[in-house]
Amino acid sequence: MKTIKRTLRFPSLQYSFLSSLLATIFVVVLGQLGMMQFLEIEAYDNLTKLKSQGTPDSRLLIVEVTELDIQAQKKWPLSDAVISDLLEKLQQHQPKVIGLDIYRDIPQPPGTNKLLKQLQSANVIVIQHIGCNGFDYIPPPRDVAEDQIGFSDLVVDSDGVIRRNLMFATLDDQEFHSFSLLLGLKYLDLDINAIEVGHNYLKIENSMFRTLQHDSGGYQNIDAAGYQTMLQYQAGDGDFSKVTLTEVLNGQLRPEMVKDKIVLVGMTAPSTKDMLLTPFSSKLGNFHLMPGVVIHGHMTSQIISRILDDQKGIWYLPQPIEILWIWMCSVAGGFLPWRFKSSQAIGISFAFGLSVISGSIIVIFFQSGWFPLVASSSSFLLANIISIVNRNLYDERYDELTRLSKPKLFEKTIKKELLKSLEKSEIQYLAVVYLDIDKFRLLNESLGHSCGDSILIELAERLNDAIPDRGKVARIGGDEFAILLTDLDDLSATKSAINYLREKISHAFSCGEDEIYIETQFGVALCENKQIISIQNLLQNAHTAMYQAKNKRLKQYEIFSDTMQLLDTDRFWLESHLRKAVKDNKIFIEYQPLLSLETQKIIGFEALARWEDPERGRISPVNFIPIAEETGLIIPLGERIMLDTCQQLHNWQRSIPAYSSLLMSVNLSIYQLEQEGFVQKIDDILKRTGILGSNLKLEITESAAMSNIEIVIQRLLSLKDLGLKIGIDDFGTGYSSLSYLHRLPADTLKIDKSFIGNIENASENIEIVKTVISLGNNLGMELVAEGVETEEQLSLLQSLDCHYGQGYFFSRPLSAKAATDLLKMTL
């Protein structure tokens, strides 16, 4: 079984790829220019606040110098004696390490010598400020061992927020270790030789500290000098355990608060200007600042937690992988508008996709990964917007199902080819070919729309294979296609090309496990390259030729000629005037009596549609009913005729009681019968006019019944449930129905007038009528002969036991008033 390709149905691959590529390039370039960094670090701050819900590290104690402490000492800076006393009292409780986050580069007597002795203790770490390239350098206290001196420099982002932890740096080949790093090493009983310095990492014991690059995470082009990591605030904006300077000096410190702990001594008084912004500052307003000593506490806690508690450090994607991630988000955003049709579905899928991306990044952040949230979301959004624009532009130009050109694009292609042909010196032809699938609606309804769609898609593929130039095949309507043929040398080349097209579509089409064959009609309009003709006329000519082939039931093709134009002009006149006649209720009804051949009494009427045009006079139903069916006008026209005839029947039954059981026959189009809700409309009309279903007979022609037999049977059974009678009109003109006759829920067979005419002289007509009457009687149906025009015909039909008849012998079709007068005369 041949597998149907779906390439025509999914241009989404190339277009979503294009959208995602454009979105990715745009977002990456913006990122490289640093235009997204502010938003990325804002997102980082929010995620940090969301994640940091732990408790302060109990291994640390902060001894804070508050405003009250400064006031109590009545001196600033604090004297060396005060700091010395503080350290001495702390040492009494055996801390693991003490970090003094107060500069002591300038002596503050009294007590300077005593302080220097305290600072030389092996478990005391002091600070220096290395500044930028030697500027703003603040030296450490003198005579302190090098491995006890850590720099207190903090890396501040462009918005003034502390997010990074500078752990190690070199300046003029001299190595510097951060205050927090030395505190951590001392707490772990390690020295600086335990640090392994790599190209982009620091390794302590088995813990790897990957250093920031200039474009890590959401950063772009930051100064990543030294060995920096992202600062993981261990307890959010919560403080560590604290005591004040005064409390320590007054002996109010419990030993267990200090023993084997990391003790940091620093300023928390706002007047000292050592208050800094952190990711948590916006949580309680811009004035919610964090003292520098507390920040150093978080840095120290981060280091020892990584080594002792196996805490994960924040990790990032390498730049190429990060770009790939952004592109993947773009692909998702670019694909959605092609996957869904409605704006609502696209909106829901967009919200869902954005939630998945954001949710994934949040989950990854809780696993210590920092992916660029704003860039990822922006690429998804931008690709989505680009794809929506592309989808709208594409849908304007191409058919949604087959992905062939739409009429407007096809016309542009014709115009381009016509202009190109004018440049050629030799005579060549251009042909527009219209193709129509015969009885496609029947195929759609009998096999299902999915099968019909599959056939249309496969047909489009075959036509594209035959005409590889893009834009030269178009879908014009539901089952109509147009093909543009160029560079044709003569009529013979045109015919060869069309025969090639016919051969391409003559093979079976796949529909599930079934193989379906279709019939098509072709209409061709030729144009010489020097000929002046409008595109609309060329298309109209091809369309006219196709309809001529359709009307003639040609299985080949029809080439447009001037004669067709006259026929097409006449049809256009009929269609336009018919539309106006239907709109203005100019289609009226006449009633032809239906008589019992046995009693020759009126038992009912047949309602007949009539059209009297002011210009052309009376126009035969044979001419305007097919046009009404093709244009869909039969639906409103048939509904109005049904309502008016039922109302007229009700009027007769009410005004002439003797005819209370009068029957009304109304002709029914297959298009009405196939219409959804048709049975309900008939039920509504019966209730509205107050007539019984048994007084209404609907007649459908034999050929129409056979065009969609399963649907016809289903709808006729539903009409029978309402009590209606069903008649088969023009019986005998289509022999294909004989095998289905027993399945049709019909009450009446109407013998076509072509068999009744000249029945008295043509023996073959008599035999046909005998056969039909015999068949009807065997199936329990009533027989109606139409077109009875002579007394001889009446006598013959009576002798053959035909039940009813109508025709000019009894009466011409009458107006409602004339029919009323006739009924009253026969009382």
Image (tube, rainbow, N blue to C red):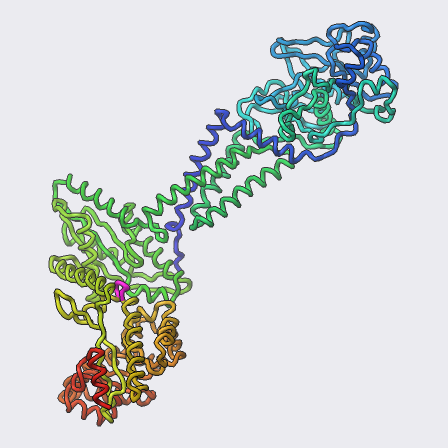
| Residue located farthest toward the front when viewing the structure as drawn | 655
Answer left or right for 661 relative to 280. Answer: left
Q: Position of residue 177 (x, y in %)?
A: 69, 16
Residue 369 against residue 710 in the figure, above or below: above
Q: Nearer the viewer, residue 549 or 272?
A: 272
Residue at 73% from the left image edge and 29% from the top image edge: 305
Q: How many marks?
A: 0
Does any portion of residue 786 appear in the rendered image? yes
Residue at 28% from the left image edge and 54% from the top image edge: 476
Q: Say which quarter of the image contains residue 258.
A: top right
Q: Position of residue 702 (x, y in %)?
A: 28, 77
Answer left or right for 824 relative to 295. Answer: left
Q: Position of residue 621 (x, y in %)?
A: 20, 71
Residue at 43% from the left image edge and 50% from the top image edge: 342
Q: Would you say residue 120 sits in the magenta stretch?
A: no
Q: Nearer the viewer, residue 179 or 815?
A: 815
Q: Quadrant of the N terminus?
A: bottom left
Residue at 48% from the left image edge and 24% from the top image edge: 33
Magenta segment, prevailing SS (helix, strand or loop): helix
Q: Position of residue 572 (x, y in %)?
A: 18, 60
Residue 727 against residue 377 in the figure, above or below: below
Q: Nearer the viewer, residue 327 or 711?
A: 711
Q: Quadrant of the C terminus?
A: bottom left
Does any portion of residue 736 appear in the rendered image? no
Q: Say which quarter of the image contains residue 153.
A: top right
Write the start and end of the magenta stretch as one range: 629-633
